[in-house]
Amino acid sequence: MTRYTVQCGYAAYYERTQTVEAETLDDALKTAIAEANAHDDWAASDVCGNTFIDAVAKGDDVDLWGDDTAQLTIPARFTEKGEEPRVIVIVSGGVVRNVAIDGGYARVEIRDYDTEGADPNDPDIQTDAEGRRYAVSDWSNVIPPPARAG
């Protein structure tokens, strides 16, 4: 039987409520972070995250952060971030029939580069960085949906 040294951790959360004035939500959030970081009167919340693995190596009582330690790869499901959502796109006859998002929330943008004959004024037709035109459709399950570039 193999012995492993495993460092486990969990996230402890602190909070500070900040009131700010700003022109936009984005500006308000940036300002709130800056102002909150300028204070040291944060309160510990009664919430902590799930236990996750920071590091693992084969051996008994290994210095996991030593220069000569060969850490093992941690499967995503054991990390602090966990497994990412899986996006499954179902295409039939050149048409997206369904998009399924398993395991969380994700932004899903389907780009269809088969735009020959499409109305050049169609708002769903975009141009990528290489100048290629594509039809875009959003199948995200994140609310609110992303703002359209343009």
Image (cartoon, rainbow, N blue to C red):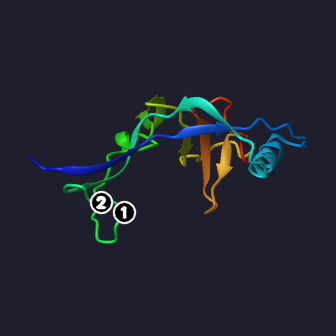
On screen, residue 88 above or below 8: above
Q: Name the front one of labels 1 and 2.
A: 1
On screen, residue 79 above or below 144: below
Tell whether 128 sits left or right of 87: right
Tell whether 2 sits left or right of 105: left
The structure residue drawn at horizontal position 49% and vertical position 31%, both measured from the top left corner, is 104
Q: Quadrant of residue 16?
A: top right
Instruction: Locate residue 114, reporting x and y percent.
Output: 53, 46
Residue type at numbered disc 1: Trp
User: Which mark is on residue 116?
Assistant: none
Residue type at numbered disc 2: Gln
Q: Which residue is mark 2?
A: 71
Q: Residue furthest left?
A: 1
Instruction: Locate residue 45, reporting x and y percent.
Output: 62, 31
The structure residue drawn at horizontal position 54% and vertical position 49%, both measured from the top left corner, is 113
Q: Which residue is mark 1?
A: 65
On screen, residue 59 above or below 26: below
Q: Using the numbered discs, state the Cα–Cα distance from disc 1 to disc 2 in whole angstroms.
A: 8 Å
